[in-house]
């Protein structure tokens, strides 16, 4: 479910003159969620995303329909190439059903259940 906010996030990240490593990861993740991969990407709706210091945060509607938020620090990304790291985050974190992670979500005041590290 490609949203207007998802589109604007990609546009904003592409416009950065010198994106950081994490901004490149986030852009790659968002583009993968737009273009598709081996998982349930077509069921994901990205509502917001940002880089804050050394973390990436993504607020999204997960496969299965639950509003979720993912936080990923660089140390939790499995590869050194930011484009590949973003694709992996899209395929294996965001576009996968929450499964057992759902039991450990930490909810904020807006009702978003956060996970990751």
Image (spheres, helix red, strand yellow):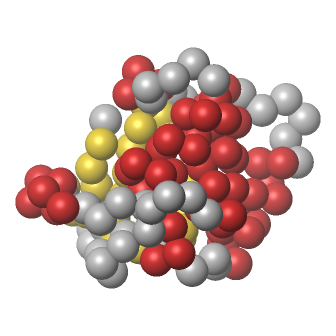
Residue found 63% across the figure and 55% down from its top? 32
Q: In this view, does 105 lie to the left or right of 24?
A: left
- Residue 8 percent coordinates (x, y): 75, 66
- Residue 64 percent coordinates (x, y): 30, 78
- The quadrant where residue 16 appears: top right
Residue furthest to the front: 38
User: So how many labels did they put on this image?
Assistant: 0
- Residue 52 appears in the figure: no
Q: In this view, does 104 lie above or below 5?
A: above
Q: Is residue 20 above or below residue 113?
A: above
Of the 4 image quadrants, the one containing the N terminus is: bottom right
Residue found 46% across the figure and 77% down from its top? 43
Residue found 60% across the figure and 49% down from its top? 29
Q: Is residue 16 left or right of residue 54?
A: right
- Residue 108 percent coordinates (x, y): 26, 62
Of the 4 image quadrants, the one containing the C terminus is: top left
Q: Is residue 80 above or below residue 57?
A: above
Q: 84 or 15: which is nearer to us? A: 84
Q: In this view, does 92 lie to the left or right of 49?
A: left
Q: 17 or 88: which is nearer to us? A: 88
- Residue 63 appears in the figure: yes
- The quadrant where residue 12 appears: bottom right
Q: Is residue 7 above or below residue 77?
A: below
- Residue 94 percent coordinates (x, y): 42, 57
Residue found 51% across the figure and 23% down from its top? 79
């Amino acid at each position: 479910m490609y949203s207007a906010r998802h589109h604007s996030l990609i546009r904003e990240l592409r416009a950065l003159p010198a994106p950081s490593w994490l901004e490149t990861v986030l852009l790659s993740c968002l583009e993968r969620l737009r273009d598709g991969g081996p998982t349930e990407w077509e069921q994901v709706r990205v509502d917001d995303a940002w880089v804050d210091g050394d973390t990436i945060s993504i607020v999204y509607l997960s496969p299965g329909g639950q509003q979720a938020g993912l936080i990923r620090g660089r140390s939790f990304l499995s590869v050194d190439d930011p484009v590949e790291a973003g694709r992996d985050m899209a395929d294996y974190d965001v576009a996968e059903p929450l499964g057992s992670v759902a039991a450990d979500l930490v909810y904020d005041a807006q009702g978003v259940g956060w996970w990751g590290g």
